[in-house]
Amino acid sequence: MNRTLNILISVVYYSLIILIVLSQSGDILWNDACSFYKLSITTYYKSIGGWALMAFLGYLYVKIKKIKDLPLRYYFLLPLITLLYTVPSYSKNLNLLIEYKPHKVKPAIIYDKSEFKHSDSCSFEFEFNGKMTKSIKVTRRRLKNLKIGDTILIKVADDCKYMNKIHDLFPSQPGNQQ
């Protein structure tokens, strides 16, 4: 394989990987932001599909470039490494969008919570356009003092109920802004 073709194959491969990663993190949006941040089973399938596509592209890249003796686990290494960028970037982009768009701070009622080793999550209900809606958020803040039925404050974009974040977990305690 000549050198120019070899370089072209590498450029195309890495460009596709970067495009997939930027798409999964929200740095590049193919549709409106509200649809992107809507958590549904379709969202999970798209994420899994993106990482599977990266693994498949890695397999093709190795076969086309005729790299020998590369264990199968290396095809999945790049998609796993990209998680180190996509997960924090996804959250950062969501938070920036909420702050940038017109938003409101609203009360929300906790109806479930889960405690994990490094973070906790809480499910809450809030009113959006006259209807009750639900959401779940992960926080690094420990939720031991929070009970089901407690009220928290969230920030939610005026035009999208899926674009919300925890504003204050303990609004009745002064100085506990999140």
Image (cartoon, grey):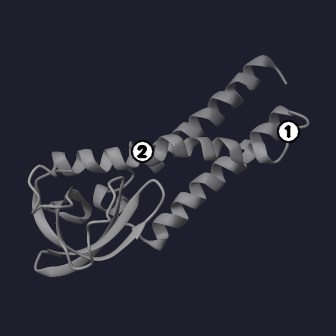
Horizontal placement of 60 versus 146: left or right?
Answer: right
Residue 165 rendering spot, x and y as whole percentages = 25, 58
Say whether residue 173 is left or right of residue 149: left
Place of residue 16 in the rendered image (x, y in percent of width and height, measured from the top left): 58, 40
Residue at figure coordinates x 46%, y 42% from the top left: 22
| Residue 41: percent from left, percent from top | 48, 72
How far is the residue under mark 2 from the one under mark 1? 30 Å
Residue ID for mark 1: 70
Residue 57 is at least partly visible in this image: no
How crowded pointer 2 is (Cα within 10 Å; few <14, some 14-19, many 20+) is rated as few
48 vs 106, nearest the viewer: 106
Q: Earlier in the sequence, mark 2 or mark 1?
A: 1
Q: Is residue 160 visible?
A: yes
**Rendering coords of residue 42 (x, y %):** 48, 70
Which residue is painted at 62% across and 46% down in the image?
79
Disc 2 residue type? Pro
Residue 145 location, quadrant: bottom left
User: Can you tell which mark lies on residue 33?
Assistant: none
- Relative placement, left or right, of 36 versus 116 is left
Which residue carries the number 2 mark? 88
